Amino acid sequence: MNLYNLIIQDKKNVKLDDVYLEPENKQQILQLIKEQKYTDELQKYGLPVNNKILLQGSSGCGKTMTAKAVANALDKNIIILNLSNIVSSRIGETSQNIKMIFDKAARERSVLFLDELDQIGKARGSDDKDVGEMRRLVNTLIQLIDYYPENALLLCATNHAEIIDTSIIRRFQLKIKYEMPSQEFLNSFYDSLLLKFPEDLRNIERKYNVSFAEAKDYAFTVVKGRLIEKLEIKNFFSD
């Protein structure tokens, strides 16, 4: 299987202000961006530049959006690879294919975003049906992360950091945790989503204890239903 068929080279502009982040997380992301912009100056003082970042936590809470926003802030392309798409392929070929993607990102100085890292970052002692091959794949990934150049940026995401080999986890200089949003945070998110609609469409019953992605899908579904209802009434009386 050709891994190039599974990557996304995304150029969609996502601004950091478009991503709902807890204040501490936003501060860490802002410093990450600034470190990338002042790499040469920091290195003159012997200061390491963080370029291997793990985004961990709940699904739908902004990990992919964060990666896109970082790439946009740095005016770089982003290469997105969802690792869940390759686990069914021949593992022996996967190591070489992933190396090709790392080389491509480093060569182009793109932001490389590996989603669902836990799919191949499983602990080497796991009872996978092909333990030997999986161990070699994990070892390859460790080496690729170790030798990833400082002038390139690697972001990885997982919903299940607890099952990832600890040797991989240690390679990340910065680990940012995403939690399910609070009611207050979701209210702010709903307000921003609904602001662009007419006032009579904004007043919806709000769902809580959900991710940002779930809240967005829910809100838009309700708004669409109300808008269609208005249009049907209008068409009924105009006929």
Image (cartoon, grey):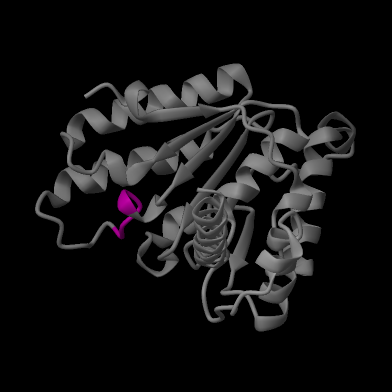
Q: Considering the image in quadrants, where does the N terminus appear?
A: top left
**Which quadrant of the view contains residue 95?**
top left
Left or right position of 33 against 84:
right
**Which quadrant of the view contains residue 111?**
top right
What's drawn in magenta, residue-wise? 119-123
Q: Position of residue 92 (x, y in %)?
A: 19, 32
Look at 57% across and 55% down and name the residue there: 234
Q: Position of residue 201 (x, y in %)?
A: 66, 65
Query: In the image as oriented, which residue stretches furthest toward the left?
Result: 129
Q: How many marks?
A: 0
Whether residue 186 is visible, yes or no, is yes
Whether residue 20 is visible, yes or no, is no
On screen, 163 above or below 34?
below
Q: Position of residue 18 (x, y in %)?
A: 73, 51
On screen, 29 above or below 72?
below
Q: Position of residue 187 (x, y in %)?
A: 70, 75
On screen, 232 above or below 41?
below
Specify whether residue 52 is painted magenta: no
Look at 46% across and 42% down and name the residue there: 114
Q: Main secondary structure of the magenta part?
A: loop
Q: Choose between 142 and 34: the one closer to the eye.
A: 34
Look at 86% across and 38% down and name the residue there: 42
Left or right position of 87 against 70:
left
